[in-house]
Amino acid sequence: MDPRLSLMESSSDEMVLKGIFLPFISPSHLVPVVDIARIFAMEGVDVTIITTPANAAVFQSSIDRDCIRGRSIRTHVVKFPQVPGLPQGLESFNASTPADMVTKIGHALSILEGPFRQLFRDIKPDFIVSDMFYPWSVDAADELGIPRLIYVGGTYFAHCAMDSLERFEPHTKVGSDDESFLIPGLPHEFEMTRSQIPDRFKAPDNLTYLMKTIKESEKRSYGSVFKSFYAFEGAYEDHYRKIMGTKSWNLGPISSWVNQDASDKASRGSRDNKAKEEQVEEGKDGSWLAWLDSKKEGSVLYVCFGSMNNFPTTQLGEIAHALEDSGHDFIWVVGKTDEGETKGFVEEFEKRVQASNKGYLICGWAPQLLILEHPSIGAVVTHCGMNTVIESVDAGLPLVTWPLFAEQFFNERLLVDVLKIGVAIGAKKWNNWNDFGDEIVKREDIGKAIALLMGGGEESEEMRKRVKALSDAAKKAIQVGGSSHNSLKDLIEELKSLKLQKLNA
Ligand code: UDP
């Protein structure tokens, strides 16, 4: 072999930018980090995603397709540690995770730090993109002398609002949990109540230490990546950079950027993705499509509360009545229904709405991206999870907002008060994940918000115009020359020049 050839090969190989992506083990963190990894691979970066077997099963088919498309991307699977009492295959925090398994999964995850760090050393990447829930990865990247980018779930808006709460503590200056206060120091004025903000702001709890550690690791990171787009929350993107003092790149909407064909959309986030893709390829992708095809444009309400939520049967009952009473057609992702009372109730309701042809129930994982882009969908009822918010806005759909936990009450304010593309259902109390407290949102309140949004009045028409403009901006953001496209290009160039500096040094 000509020695000059091998030198040329090795030097050009050395110049390929190599990144590791470490997603968290819950669907709504896993799915976007994988999407981000895939857009890096689209731009010629050599990508390795590190995860565990059950989590890899959620996205591997898309990675296989990307390889066929000629992209340099792979998954490195690490065995999930065996912890006494934890059944094999239980490797994720989601709506089906039994409450008594949460600590065990957390324990197994902490054991993985060692193997993950070892992989970083073996793979020798030029940079790491890590989920916020691995704060230790900032030290691991330091040891290797490479940049660590943090993936921060949620909106810039929510992060800025939470920073304001920490800095100014406006919630300590009101007389009761229901008295509203302004969140100070932000680009817009909006109000919240003490009962709507996460508990950790009111008194230290088991999340306080973790969130503090995450914020410190965020500040020590080379920068952060987000998944919205400048036209959506640009003022807060700028504000975030100021308060954090770090760099940040906004790369969304990533879901539509990377999932451009029906197979990727159909399988996104689902463990039985093979079956879903085959249905799409054979043109028989489930009866939900035929049902939606039979409906008028913009006439159907899509109702979904994300990947983490299981309402109690009483709350499901209120939703069911509200949907039926509204007179509008709806597609409702009910989620897990394998427990006695809930199962019976849902089956009964499903029979009724099948007979009236007014509703379609999905008792499992819905192909959300495909549903949202269907022309018959007219609006979305959401818990304000950040992914669903961006996906709905991207699809040009106004929202009924029903926040439950995490940063969702902040997202509601962005949609309702700042962007004016959402109608609040009137949820009053923040709760921990899957703890519904004693608040049941009544059918009348759900019905009012649905009527306002689907009723075709002036207010709803104005919202539709605004969200359509945002949807157009979302499409532009990911095209060549668009804000998110430029962000990704800039970030990759910056990472390449860091690599070059290191090589020269
Ligand atoms: N999702 C889906 N099908 C479902 C439920 C959820 O495809 O049946 C996807 C949805 O498209 C989104 C994510 O899962 O990308 C949910 O994230 P979100 O931030 O909206 O809510 P979370 O799951 O964090 O509560």
Image (cartoon, rainbow, N blue to C red):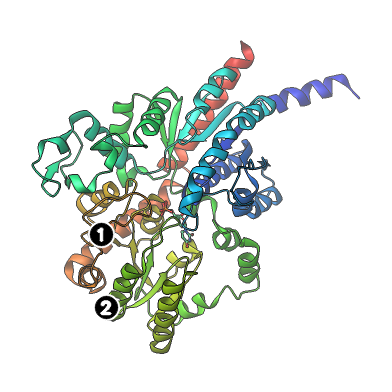
The residue positioned 65% from the left and 48% from the top of the image is 53
Say if 304 sits above or below 456 in the image.
Answer: above
What distance separates the C-alpha of mark 1 from that of mark 2?
25 Å
- Residue 400 relative to residue 92: left or right: left
Local crowd at mark 1 within 10 Å, few (<14), some, or many (≥20)? few
> Callout 2: helix, strand or loop?
helix
The residue positioned 51% from the left and 41% from the top of the image is 106
**Residue 491 or residue 407, whichever sits in front:** 407
The amino acid beneath tag 2 is Ser
Q: Is residue 429 visible?
A: yes
Ligand 1 visible in quadrant: bottom left
- Residue 147 relative to residue 187: left or right: right
Q: Tell me residue 500's x, y (percent).
A: 60, 19
> Callout 1: helix, strand or loop?
loop
**Residue indicated by mark 2:** 326
Q: Which residue is most to the top?
A: 505
Q: Tell me residue 211's x, y (percent).
A: 37, 33
**Which one is earlier in the sequence, the residue at label 1 or at label 2?**
2
What number of labels is visible?
Answer: 2
The residue positioned 42% from the left and 58% from the top of the image is 306
The amino acid beneath tag 1 is Asp
Disc assigned to residue 438 = 1
**Residue 434 or residue 501, whichever sits in front:** 434
Q: Tell me residue 191's x, y (percent).
A: 15, 46
Q: Which residue is most to the front?
A: 84
